[in-house]
Amino acid sequence: MTGPDRIVVVGAGLAGLSAAERLREHGWDGELVIVGDEPHRPYNRTPLSKELLTGDRQPAELRLRCHTELDAVWRTGTEVRGVDLRRRVLALPHGERLDFDGLVIATGAEARHLPGAPTASPRVHLLRTVDDARALDVSLATARRLVVVGGGFIGCELASTARERALDVSIVASAPTLLARPLGDELGEYATELHRRHGVRLYLDNAVAEWSESRRGITLRLRGGERLRADTVVIGIGAVPRADWLAGNGLDLSDGVACTPTCHVLGPHRRPLDGIVAAGDVARWPNLRIDPVPRRVEHWLNAIEMGQHAATALLTGPRGVDPFTPVPRFWSHQHGVRIQSVGMPGLGGDLRVLDGSMRSGRFVAGFLRPHYRTGQEVLLGAVAFDAPRALLRYRDHINRPLPGDLAVEEPAAVSA
C-alpha cells in the first residue's frame, strides 16, 4: 500500500506496537520510526500489579513479541518535547527535530499522583511502568503493612496480591464502595465484600488528610480521624493521559486527544487531520456502538484494536475507513476470583442477573438501558464473576436488545 514516506509512532507501548505492525501488514514500506520515553521495548503492563509482584512472572517475560517484520528505527529512552502539526515536525531532546509525513499518537497515560503525598519517599509508590513494579517489589519484600490509596482496579489488584504475600493490607478510597466507577454501586458492593472476606481493611468514603514519615514508616491521618501506619504506600487513583507534548496546536486536550470516530485527530476547526491519528489510553473518541459521547478506554485489548484501526485509518484517510466501534473488554483477578466485563457497564443502567446467581459467586450481571437513538431497551454491558463461558453469550449483544433465549430472569441482589 502506498502512503507517507515517513511515519513516526510516538509511544512504544502496546497501542504503538500494534499500529506499527498493522502498517507493515498493509504492505506499507516507507520509513518507520518508533519513539518511546522508556528505555525498554514494548512490554505487557497487565501483570505489573499481579504476576510480577507474586513472582509468577519475571520482567524479561513481559516483552511483547512482534508478529511481523517491522524494519523500524527504535528511539527508546527519548521523550518528545513538542510537535508542530502544521509543519509536521517533532521536537526531541537536545534540539533535535524529526520530520514526519504521518503520525501515530500513542503516548498512553501516566499514574496520577495524589496532591500532598510525598514525592521522593522510597516508601511511597505509583505503579505504571515495569521500573515502578520493580521498586515496589523491593519495598514489599521487607514490609509488613501496606496501605493502598485508591479503590479502582489497580488498587484492588495490588491489595489482593499483597494479601497473597501475607501482608496486612488497608485500602483508603473516596467512594463508598470499591470499583464503583467501572462496575456500578451494586457490583461494587459485591466486590467490597470480597475484599473484606479476605482480610483487607477498608476505609471507604474517606481520604488522606495528612502524611508524616519517620524511620519507622509512614503515618496517614484520614479525613475520618483514623491513623494508619504503613511500611509501604501505593497510590492508585487513576491515570492522566500524556498529551501535554501536543499543546500549542489548537487541539482539544481536555481529557486526552480528541478524535473522530475513525481515530483521526480533530484539528483546530474540529476537522480530522489527514495523516495524524491517535490510539490507546491517550485517545478520546466516540464509540458509536455505545453512543456519540467521546471517551477514553484504558484497557489492554482496546490498545491493540485501536492501534490497528488507527494505522489503517492513517493509510486510508478520514473518508475511506469505517468508524472504530469495538466491544470494550477487560478482566481482573482478585482473591482468586476472575472478574470479566464486556461493553460499558460503568455507564450505569438497570442491573439484572442474566446467568447464575450472586449468592453462588458465579454469575453474569447485565446493565440495560434505552438505546440512545431508538429508545428500545438494550444491553449496555455485562460483568461476570467466575463465569467466563456464560459471558461469551452476551458479547455480541452489546447495545442490542436481548433475544428471547437470553431474557432477564431475576433482579440483582447483593449477597455478602
Image (cartoon, rainbow, N blue to C red):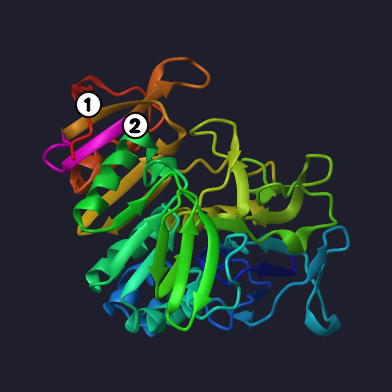
User: Which amino acid lies under the numbered mark 2 shown in the image of this protein?
Assistant: His
Q: Is residue 360 magenta?
A: yes
* Residue at image location 70% in from the left, 68% down from the top: 7
* Residue at image location 78% in from the left, 65% down from the top: 101
Instruction: Check the picture and name the quadrant holding the C terminus.
Output: top left
**Residue at the spot of label 2:** 397
User: Which amino acid lies under the numbered mark 1 shown in the image of this protein?
Assistant: Leu
Closest to the observer, 202 or 281: 202
With 216 as the anchor, is 245 left or right in this view?
Answer: right
Secondary-structure class at tag 2: helix
Residue 279, can we see it?
no
Point out the stretch of residues depicted in magenta: 357-366
Instruction: Check the picture and name the quadrant holding the N terminus.
Output: bottom right
In the image, which disc is placed on residue 406?
Answer: 1
Q: Badge 1: few (under 14), some or many (20 or more) residues near its Cα, within 10 Å?
A: few
- Image location (x, y in percent) of residue 201: 30, 56
Q: Earlier in the sequence, mark 1 or mark 2?
A: 2
